[in-house]
Amino acid sequence: MSEPITTDVVIIGAGPVGIFAVFELGLLDMKCHLIDILDRPGGQCTELYPEKPIYDIPGYPIVGAQELVDKLMEQAKPFGPTFHYSQMVERLEKREDGTFLIGTDAGTLFHAKVVVIAAGGGSFQPKRPPVPGIEAYEGHSVFYAVRKMEAFRDQDILIVGGGDSALDWTLNLQPIARRVTLLHRRDEFRAAPHSVEQMRKLVSDGAMDLRLGQVTGLKGQGGQLETATVKQNDGSVLDVPCTRMLPFFGLTMKLGPISEWGLNLHENLIPVDTEKFETSVKGIFAVGDINTYPGKLKLILSGFHEVALMAQAAKRIIAPNQRIVFQYTTSSTSLQKKLGVA
């Protein structure tokens, strides 16, 4: 474990509501670190439907999901948030002084006065492929995300999948791997056409392999892969040498470790009040789709409203003796200076 990173607020979840929380907290001079299990900001908007049109964001008759995320990131930029991607919060402890110690599965520690849970429907969890005995290799030679590319240098890598993640990592890891094999169940891909073209060029140049079929078994000792048994689409079976395997079978939403943090839960949602959007634990707030209260509407718009009220309450915890003066961004010179528009 590293030394804790000290900050005012830790935001769990970097979707649209989590990103907008940076803006509202920043207006009140609170510094934020954000943690997300995905490898980029945006949550469901980015991961599941980046091109989906959204029609109920004020001021935008129509806006693409990824476009909205990009605009929110631009809006939050003046406040210098720090993002910690490809990490899941596993540990959340309230200390005697009322502050929190937060730990991730990557060994990152945070010490914060306020925690904001903006995790949507929970954390995105990778789908495990239906391969017998795969659990024994997970975390040793089977991985569902790439945290450090160097861990894959000079390895025989089997990448399984046909979407953007599978193609992106095929192209990124091919230059440093001993050999890359991409396996997909059919010769059609959901990834960006340019990525598919690059992959096919590498295959035609003999720089990597493409197989069509499915993994049916794994071989190796002590969690270390040696080969994967592949049933090809023509019915033949072969063993593909691999010391690392990256299955990209999509993601599923799970509440995950949130259920173990001592919060009151209702049907896998976190009840909050509608004054501060605080949970049953003082100093922990929940905003967006993860929370519930009478009349709750699961809209990004609702999450934005919740964040504005949450920020006021969070400021009272972080600076209890400081008088909070409500200001409008349209008329406050001090706020406009923070935004760099004065």
Image (tube, rainbow, N blue to C red):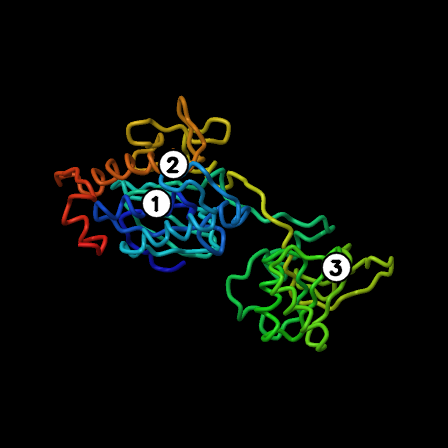
Q: Secondary structure under badge 3?
A: loop
Q: Position of residue 310 (x, y in %)?
A: 29, 36
Instruction: Tell me the CA gap for discs 3 and 2.
Output: 41 Å
Foreground of the two, 185 or 226:
185
Q: Amino acid at mark 2?
A: Gly
Q: Which mark is residue 20?
A: 1
Within 10 Å of the Cα at label 3, are there few (<14), some (14-19), or many (20+) other Cα atoms?
A: few
| Residue 197 position by quadrant | bottom right
Q: Quadrant of the C terminus?
A: bottom left
Foreground of the two, 35 or 93:
35
Q: Position of residue 316 (x, y in %)?
A: 20, 38
Q: Where 45 sits versus 177, above or below?
A: above
Answer yes or no: do the residues labelled 1 and 2 have beta carbons within 8 Å? yes
Q: Position of residue 74 (x, y in %)?
A: 34, 54
> Which residue corresponds to the image point at 60% horizontal and 65% vertical from the top-left?
194
Q: Which mark is residue 303?
A: 2
Within 10 Å of the Cα at label 2, are there few (<14), some (14-19), or many (20+) other Cα atoms?
A: many
Residue on which disc 3 sits: 187
Within 10 Å of the Cα at label 1, are there few (<14), some (14-19), or many (20+) other Cα atoms?
A: many
Left or right of 270? Residue 168 is: right
> Which residue corresponds to the image point at 45% horizontal and 42% vertical from the top-left?
62
Between discs 1 and 3, the one toward the N terminus = 1
Q: Amino acid at mark 1?
A: Phe
